[in-house]
Amino acid sequence: MNQYKPLTIPERILMGPGPSDVAPSVLRAMASPLLGHLDPVFMTIMNEIMAQLRDVFATENKLTMPMSGTGSAGMETAFVNVIEPGDVVIVGVKGVFGQRMVDVAQRCGAQVVQVEAPWGEAIRPEQIEDALKREKKVKAVAIVHAETSTGVRQPLAEIGRLAHAYDALYIVDAVTSLGGIPVDVDDNGIDVCYSGTQKCISAPPGLAPVTLNERAAAVMAGRKTKVQSWYLDLNMIQSYWGNERLYHHTAPITMNYAIHEALRLILDEGLEACYERHDRLGRALQT
């Protein structure tokens, strides 16, 4: 006799940074009939998700899509596609996820320069500028926008300006921030940005939205070595999400249903209203 019973999941109010509670309509979307990953209807859903993500990232980047995996897959995607062995990468470290950036960059063979701030404080732009002046031929500057481990919000625009002044790529972790506060990818000069579905987007964990501009895409296309990860190789994956529709791996179909509905809810509410709600409720929990 089968000893296993059907799952009965208790209801919880999730008060951590993620996973967060999701709307009933997101859960209902996940229960929709399964489509194949090359079904024309699913292709239409994919196109809409890319457009939705461009709106939420505030970017015109063509190369904008959700990667299969959680936010850490987004981090790996950002680094493995533009960083090659021997590249110099400056990483701002002010918490757990800045330190994880260091680890991921080192696994790509990068020479990592850590710029540190005490936990609970933001990285100062002059710290990044000092590192850029000291090092030669920096490939990228990487920073966490909203550091989950401390709650610190990192100003982005000035560091982006400095990175570009020294001809470096600007990589930003927006796992916690996307959908909750403005990321403004294009206005902040961000070349590579990634997030996760389980925080302010309010979908279950399982996808990592990423966006790369033409500058980053050119760096990726001009690599001298193979991308360190087959699974996260955007040179191949963009052919599945683009017009060619070439199979790479089987997409998590129902998670794409979920992010489509979650992004629809954000855009229906309006980004500014969504940001105001997060700010208002966040301040309420601090008092």
Image: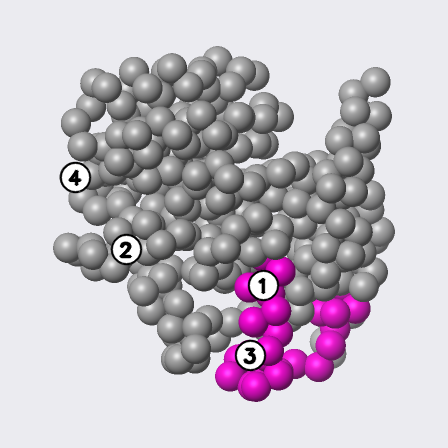
Residue situated in front as seen by the camera: 123 or 37? 123
What is the span of residues highlighted in magenta in the rendered image?
Answer: 27-53
Horizontal and vertical percent position of residue 150: 59, 24
Predominant SS of the magenta segment: helix
Quarter where residue 281 is shown:
top right
Amino acid on which the number 2 mark rests in the picture: Ala
Amino acid on which the number 3 mark rests in the picture: Met
Q: Earlier in the sequence, mark 3 or mark 1?
A: 3
Could you say whether the residue bearing mark 2 is in a helix, strand or loop? helix
Horizontal and vertical percent position of residue 189: 43, 39
Q: Disc 4 or disc 3, which is closer to the eye?
A: 3
Residue 51: assigned label:
1
Residue at image position (53%, 15%) is 121
Q: Earlier in the sequence, mark 2 or mark 1?
A: 1
Q: Which residue is identified by label 2?
A: 218
Q: Quadrant of the C terminus?
A: top right
Residue at image position (80%, 38%) is 277
